Image: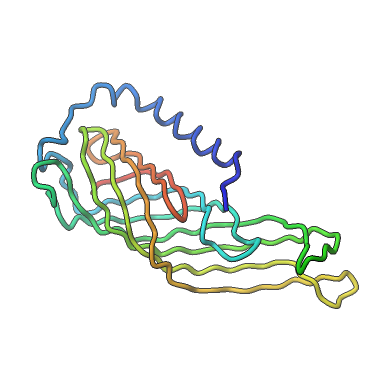
Amino acid sequence: MQIKKPVLRAFFGLLLALAATLLPDTASAESVIKRPGAHPDYSVELEPHAVIGWGGWYAGPFDDEGFGLGLRASIPIVQQGPIKKINNSMAIGFGGDFLFYDGDDYDCDWGRCRGFTRDYGGNALYLPVVLQWNFWLTDVISVFGEPGLAIRHAWVHWEGPCGSPTGYCDYDDSDTDFVPFIFFAGGRFMFGDTVGLTVRLGWPYLGVGASFLL
């Protein structure tokens, strides 16, 4: 499944706008990657964000892109390390992301086309747990990788063939499953000591949000 081009253009257009906003601070940033421990000292990072979901939602025609909101909390577990000679740290991240999906699909099940377009849609709730490995490059920019896992619950509704006069009926279903592997890579751009912007790219969704280091 591929993300539609308009969605990609909108997402990367937003990233370019954010990069242009941050460019003056980035150009004057001081490198701290070779100064172990030279990063903000915080107890928890709270990150409300918007997300674009693009993979792993539900089987068949329902596996489409969605949009939603989420919240991530990351608690530092290693303030300096595991690489001792550079400025890096680790945190455990957890939270929730709620996505909305909507679409339509031309009904051609079992090799026969019935000549109508059926609507489908639904929602998905992801509850991820990740290991966040941070690399603090400058006093403005840090990057991270986040391998982890998630629990996903999906609700779907669709129109399908039946014996009604119209030839199709409304159906609903739900599913809860375990997603054994998710992965994100991203960057954090600080506006000050405790407030910044986070961009997260990965599977099964992309995200942009605010970071608050508390």
Identify the image quadrant of residue 63.
bottom right
Q: Note whether 113 is above or below 32 in the view shown.
A: below
Q: Note whether 155 is above or below 9 in the view shown.
A: below
Q: Residue furthest front?
A: 111
Q: Position of residue 86 (x, y in %)?
A: 13, 41
Q: Position of residue 203 (x, y in %)?
A: 44, 54
Identify the image quadrant of residue 61.
bottom right
Front residue of 181 and 190: 181
Residue at screen point 35% across, 55% down: 72
Task: Please indicate whether residue 171 sits to the left or right of residue 199 in the image.
Answer: right
Front residue of 166 and 145: 145
Q: Position of residue 10 (x, y in %)?
A: 55, 37
Q: Note whether 64 is above or below 85 in the view shown.
A: below
Task: Please indicate whether residue 103 sits to the left or right of residue 24 in the image.
Answer: right
Q: Residue furthest bottom?
A: 163
Residue at screen point 24% across, 51% down: 133
Residue at screen point 53% across, 53% down: 54
Front residue of 65 and 50: 65
Task: Please indicate whether residue 214 sits to the left or right of residue 120 in the image.
Answer: left
Q: Position of residue 48 (x, y in %)?
A: 39, 50
Task: Please indicate whether residue 48 sits to the left or right of residue 189 in the image.
Answer: right
Front residue of 68 and 55: 55
